């Protein structure tokens, strides 16, 4: 059994049929389908290229990069293959109502992906995250730092920061002890190392310096989990495989296999770490099942 705990419909040139074919090719039984609800100005030109064109085709200026209706469509067509996720733009005045409705009517199991140019410990956001904790719904958070995402152009933004800092995450872990959070993206994974590279480099490849904030937070907060998806998760685990092996074995119940792309490099890094069978089963599916079946 393998569960991909982070992916998106109509993403990176994939439609429903090619998405299913890719899952079959890579031995993936189920996928958590996550939305990305954010207004223009919160996503970069690169992200526009990843959305299979629907943003260009839409006449709605409020169209989102990964709308909820696309996730619903996939789940309705193959309910045995997909787990429904949803996260509203937390700045919407009706965000909490939208989240509650998504859970009660559509059976949403995951809050994600939260990827917004705002501090995630905003009181309005915390109210939604606390609801997710009460409803046993895990929350996937994307973090990026401004200088690490700075671009040569200025329109519509000169950088693409999301969420705040690692201190914002720790504040959330304290504020919402009943809520399980999945850390994701360069602004999270850079903290696998005890250095400052992540503030200016999106995906550092320098050797890991032990004592990073991820290890500290995993030890201090039982409600933190690690989403290993995308280049950020793969790069972090590849930086120092000996350290990654030790970190995962220290917290085997806190790592989730996930892709946020359409290849099998994340399976490759898991296999290269030479983890034992029980630990790999936790990463590949048991941790994901436990989070959404509490």
Image (cartoon, rainbow, N blue to C red):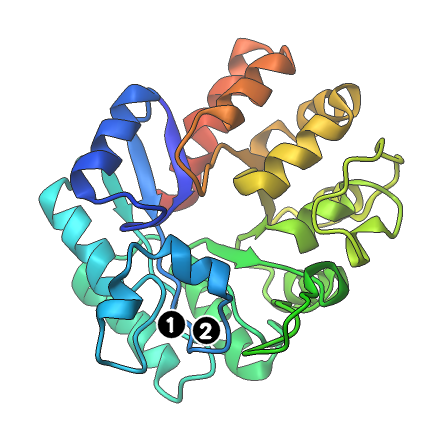
Residue at horizontal 45 percent and vertical 59 percent from the top: 47
Question: In the rendered image of this protein, does residue 149 appear above or below residue 207?
Answer: below
Question: In the rendered image of this protein, does residue 261 appear above or below residue 45?
Answer: above
Residue at horizontal 27 percent and vertical 51 percent from the top: 10
**Does the residue at mark 2 contact the one at mark 1 (Cβ under 8 Å)?**
yes
Image quadrant in which you'd find residue 207:
top right
Give how far apart the Cα atoms at labels 2 and 1 are: 10 Å
Residue at horizontal 66 percent and vertical 35 percent from the top: 235
Which quarter of the rendered picture does the C terminus lie within?
A: top left
Q: Is residue 27 left or right of residue 38?
A: left
Helix, strand or loop at label 1? It is loop
Residue 192 visible in the shown view: yes
**Front one among 216 and 194:** 194
Residue 164 in the image: x percent, y percent? 68, 69
Q: Which mark identifies residue 202?
A: none
Image quadrant in which you'd find residue 89:
bottom left
Residue 237 in the image: x percent, y percent? 68, 30
Q: Nearer the viewer, mark 2 or mark 1?
A: 1
Helix, strand or loop at label 2? It is helix
Residue highlighted by disc 2: 128
Residue at horizontal 54 percent and vertical 78 percent from the top: 156
Question: In the rendered image of this protein, does residue 94 appear above or below residue 197?
Answer: below
Residue highlighted by disc 1: 88
Image quadrant in which you'd find residue 104:
bottom left
Report crowding for label 2: few under 14, some 14 to 19, many 20 or more residues within 10 A (C-alpha).
Answer: many
Question: In the rendered image of this protein, does residue 78 appear above or below residue 143?
Answer: above
Residue 51 in the image: x percent, y percent? 34, 57
Report crowding for label 1: few under 14, some 14 to 19, many 20 or more residues within 10 A (C-alpha).
Answer: many
In the rendered structure, which disc, 2 or 1, sits on the residue that comes first in sequence?
A: 1
Residue 83 in the image: x percent, y percent? 28, 45
Q: Is residue 271 left or right of residue 261?
A: right
Residue at the farthest front position: 152
């Amino acid at each position: 059994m393998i569960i991909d705990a982070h992916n998106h419909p109509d993403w990176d040139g994939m439609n429903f049929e090619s998405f299913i074919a890719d899952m079959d090719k890579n031995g993936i039984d189920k996928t958590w389908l996550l939305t990305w609800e954010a207004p223009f100005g919160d996503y970069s030109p690169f992200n526009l290229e990843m959305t299979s064109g629907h943003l260009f085709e839409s006449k709605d200026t409020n169209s989102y990069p990964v709308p909820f209706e696309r996730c619903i469509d996939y789940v309705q067509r193959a309910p045995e293959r997909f787990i429904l996720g949803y996260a509203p733009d937390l700045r919407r005045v009706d965000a909490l109502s939208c989240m509650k409705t998504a859970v009660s009517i559509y059976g949403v199991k995951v809050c994600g992906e939260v990827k917004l140019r705002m501090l995630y410990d905003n009181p309005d956001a915390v109210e939604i995250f606390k609801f997710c904790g009460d409803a046993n719904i895990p929350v996937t958070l994307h973090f990026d730092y401004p200088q690490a995402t700075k671009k040569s152009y200025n329109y519509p933004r000169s950088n693409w920061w999301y969420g705040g800092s690692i201190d914002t995450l720790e504040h959330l872990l304290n504020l919402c002890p009943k809520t399980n959070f999945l850390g994701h993206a360069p602004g999270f994974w850079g903290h696998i190392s005890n250095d400052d590279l992540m503030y200016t480099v999106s995906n550092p490849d320098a050797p890991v310096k032990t004592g990073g904030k991820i290890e500290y937070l995993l030890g201090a907060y039982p409600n933190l989990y690690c989403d290993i998806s995308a280049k950020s998760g793969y790069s972090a685990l590849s930086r120092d495989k000996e350290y990654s092996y030790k970190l995962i074995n220290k917290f085997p119940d806190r790592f989730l296999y996930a892709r946020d792309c359409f290849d099998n490099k994340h399976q490759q890094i898991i296999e290269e770490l030479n983890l034992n069978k029980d630990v790999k089963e936790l990463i590949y599916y048991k941790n994901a099942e436990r989070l959404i079946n509490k």
